[in-house]
């Protein structure tokens, strides 16, 4: 065994390969306000995993943090706190030069506006992304023509992007995103600027590419139609990961399909319909695990009402937080909710 082989094995031992393609861990991002403008906390501890070959959508209203999260995942900006691991490597700590290569080789981007170079032809827009990686021209030419053909715009290869229709631009943008055969395609509202018919065709194309090439797809949307093509959806609201959803979601009725998530800080964000049933915002609750599938929430007010008015010292224990005397077999203080 060579020294190089031994070093490779040692690196794999020290940094074991993750079963996930990508893991976001406790991502925070703050847009710092200037002068008298207040800072905005766009993401508040978001964590999730993305497996190879998945088609996942990030759903939520405008201003929920979707675009910010996609830019951090794709290495276009660094989070204020937290980390993004791509195949086990922390890309948020990667030097800028290496991060640029990561974006060029591992990630393909499709934006709502397409973001093509409008004074270049469809061919040159796709070809240029491979030229930046130093690939030989003949390879680039063959790959570009194949992708434009796959997208159904080969006949428009010499047309400058400024003269393409919205749907044609998006098809060229998808071809450009796929040019370097990335492992992850990131799409931010990819059908936002096209009509419904074109939107359906693009989404069918995304799904076909996902199924046939195995490329992992991560798309942000507030469109029911777009989210319906995903294998599962991640719901953001005001920068918080509110829950997960399976296929066939209705963005107007997310309470019906939401799977509640406990994050890495042990925070459990309860859906609005559950909070409405509890009917007490800011109240204190005792939590008990009934079994592996159930937890029990009990208002501390009801526990206080049930507590005996006079309790002898032999039957009680004093709360270290508020000094209230509690039943000896209790787990939580009946006054302040502190755990014993």
Image: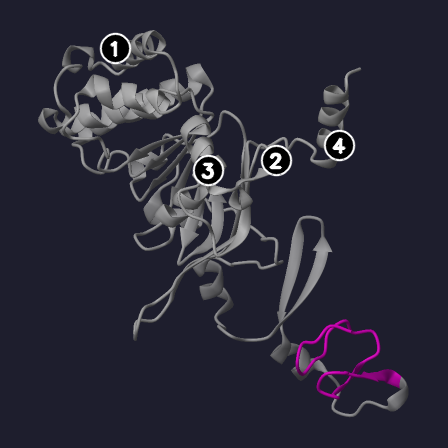
- Assess whether mark 3 and mark 2 are in contact (beta carbons under 8 angstroms): no
Question: Which structural element holds mark 3?
Answer: helix
The residue under the point 51% across, 75% down is 282
Residue at mark 2 to residue at mark 4: CA–CA distance: 12 Å
Query: Can the viewer see residue 127?
Result: yes
- Mark carried by residue 97: 3
Q: Which residues make up the magenta segment?
A: 315-340
> According to the image, label 2 marks what residue?
88
Residue at mark 3 to residue at mark 1: CA–CA distance: 33 Å
Question: Which structural element holds mark 2?
Answer: loop
> According to the image, label 4 marks what residue?
13
Residue 130 placement: quadrant: top left
- Assess whether mark 1 and mark 3 are in contact (beta carbons under 8 angstroms): no
Query: Quick check: 6 left or right of 256?
Result: right
Q: Position of residue 154 (x, y in %)?
A: 20, 11
Whether the magenta-drawn stretch holds residue 328 is answered as: yes
Q: Position of residue 234 (x, y in %)?
A: 45, 43
| Disc number lying in front (3 or 1) | 3
Residue at mark 1 to residue at mark 4: CA–CA distance: 44 Å
Mark 1 and mark 4 lie on one chain; the one further toward the N terminus is 4
Q: Position of residue 121 (x, y in %)?
A: 17, 21
> According to the image, label 1 marks what residue?
149
Q: Residue furthest left?
A: 163
Whether the magenta-drawn stretch holds residue 37 is answered as: no
Residue 328 placement: quadrant: bottom right
């Amino acid at each position: 065994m060579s020294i190089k082989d031994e070093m490779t094995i040692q690196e794999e031992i020290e940094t074991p390969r993750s079963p996930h393609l990508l893991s976001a861990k406790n991502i925070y991002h703050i847009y710092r306000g200037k002068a008298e403008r207040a800072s905005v906390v766009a993401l508040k501890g978001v964590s999730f995993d993305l497996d190879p070959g998945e088609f996942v959508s990030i759903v939520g209203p405008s201003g929920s943090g979707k675009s910010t999260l996609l830019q951090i995942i794709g290495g276009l900006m660094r989070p204020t706190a937290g980390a993004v691991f791509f195949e086990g490597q922390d890309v948020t700590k990667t030097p800028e030069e290496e991060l640029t290569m990561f974006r060029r080789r591992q990630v393909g981007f499709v934006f709502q506006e397409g973001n093509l170079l409008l004074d270049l032809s469809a061919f040159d827009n796709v070809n240029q992304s491979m030229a930046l990686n130093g690939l030989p021209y003949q390879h680039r030419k063959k790959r570009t023509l194949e992708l434009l053909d796959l997208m159904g715009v080969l006949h428009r290869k010499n047309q400058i992007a400024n003269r393409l229709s919205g749907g044609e631009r998006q098809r060229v943008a998808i071809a450009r995103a796929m040019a370097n055969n990335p492992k992850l395609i990131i799409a931010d509202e990819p059908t936002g600027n096209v009509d419904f018919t074109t939107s359906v065709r693009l989404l069918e194309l995304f799904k076909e590419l996902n199924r046939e090439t195995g490329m992992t797809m991560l798309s942000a949307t507030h469109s029911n139609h777009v989210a319906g093509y995903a294998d599962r959806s991640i719901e953001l609201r005001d920068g918080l990961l509110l829950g997960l959803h399976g296929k066939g979601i209705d963005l107007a009725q997310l309470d019906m399909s939401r799977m509640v998530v406990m994050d890495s800080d042990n925070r459990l964000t309860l859906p609005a319909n559950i909070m409405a049933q509890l009917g007490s915002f800011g109240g204190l609750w005792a939590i008990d695990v009934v079994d592996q599938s159930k937890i029990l929430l009990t208002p501390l007010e009801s526990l206080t009402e049930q507590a005996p008015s006079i309790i002898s010292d032999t039957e009680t224990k004093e709360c270290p937080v508020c000094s209230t005397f509690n039943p000896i077999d209790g787990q939580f203080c009946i006054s302040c909710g502190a755990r014993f």
